[in-house]
Image (cartoon, rainbow, N blue to C red):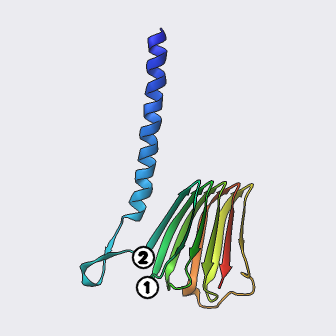
Amino acid sequence: MDNQKTFVKYFVIVLVIIGGLGVLGKLQDRVTNKEASEGGKSRNDFFEVNNVMGGSKKGYSFSELKGGIINCVMGGADINLTKTTLKDGALIDVFLLMGGAKIIVPKDWNVILDTSNIMGDSKDKNGGSQSTEDVSKTLKINGLIVMGGLEVVRN
């Protein structure tokens, strides 16, 4: 009887580990879809930032930003997109668990925040006064924020 309990305990642990690796693999699949571009080089104008109990500060200069993923667990990310142009329909997926993210965008971009906040906050500083009529410059940010914060700053 004691051997059965031990077997079941370790079997459940192995299943949880395999399931976690499967989830990480699915997240990676979203990023590795590459498209061919000039010169045969693969480019997809897509970024991914993953921080666990740490932080990062990154700046990007894509020719056409298509989107990105920001995952922070007890960590933070500072993303600067002021030197990039925006592709119509660009989307950033955000998951913050007890962490924070700051996204710096150009002044002429429209930003649509569509986040679910649980004891957290997402705000677009200067968003009401800085909107533009050019709908092709619209960045949509989706995600889940649990006990964390997301801030969009115009520069």
- Residue bearing mark 2: 45
Query: Where is residue 93, by image quadrant?
Result: bottom right
The residue lying furthest to the left in this view is 40
Q: Residues within 10 Å of mark 2 (few under 14, many from 20)?
A: some
Does 39 sit left or right of 100 as displayed?
Answer: left
Task: From the top left corner, tell me how far across and down residue 142 is, in percent.
Answer: 59, 66
Instruction: Identify the mark at residue 63; answer none if there is no mark.
Output: 1
Q: Where residue 61 sits in the image (x, y, percent)?
A: 47, 82
CB atoms of marks 1 and 2 within 8 Å: yes
| Image location (x, y in percent) of residue 11 | 43, 26
| Residue 59 vertical position relative to residue 74 in the rendered view, above or below | below
Could you say whether the residue bearing mark 1 is in a helix, strand or loop?
loop
Q: If you read the primary sequence from the N terminus, does the residue marked by circle 1 or circle 2 appear first? A: 2
Height in image: 110 above or below 142? Answer: below
Q: Residue at x 54, y 86 (%)?
A: 136
Q: Residue at x 45, y 83 (%)?
A: 64
Q: Residue at x 50, y 82 (%)?
A: 88
Q: Secondary structure at mark 2?
A: loop
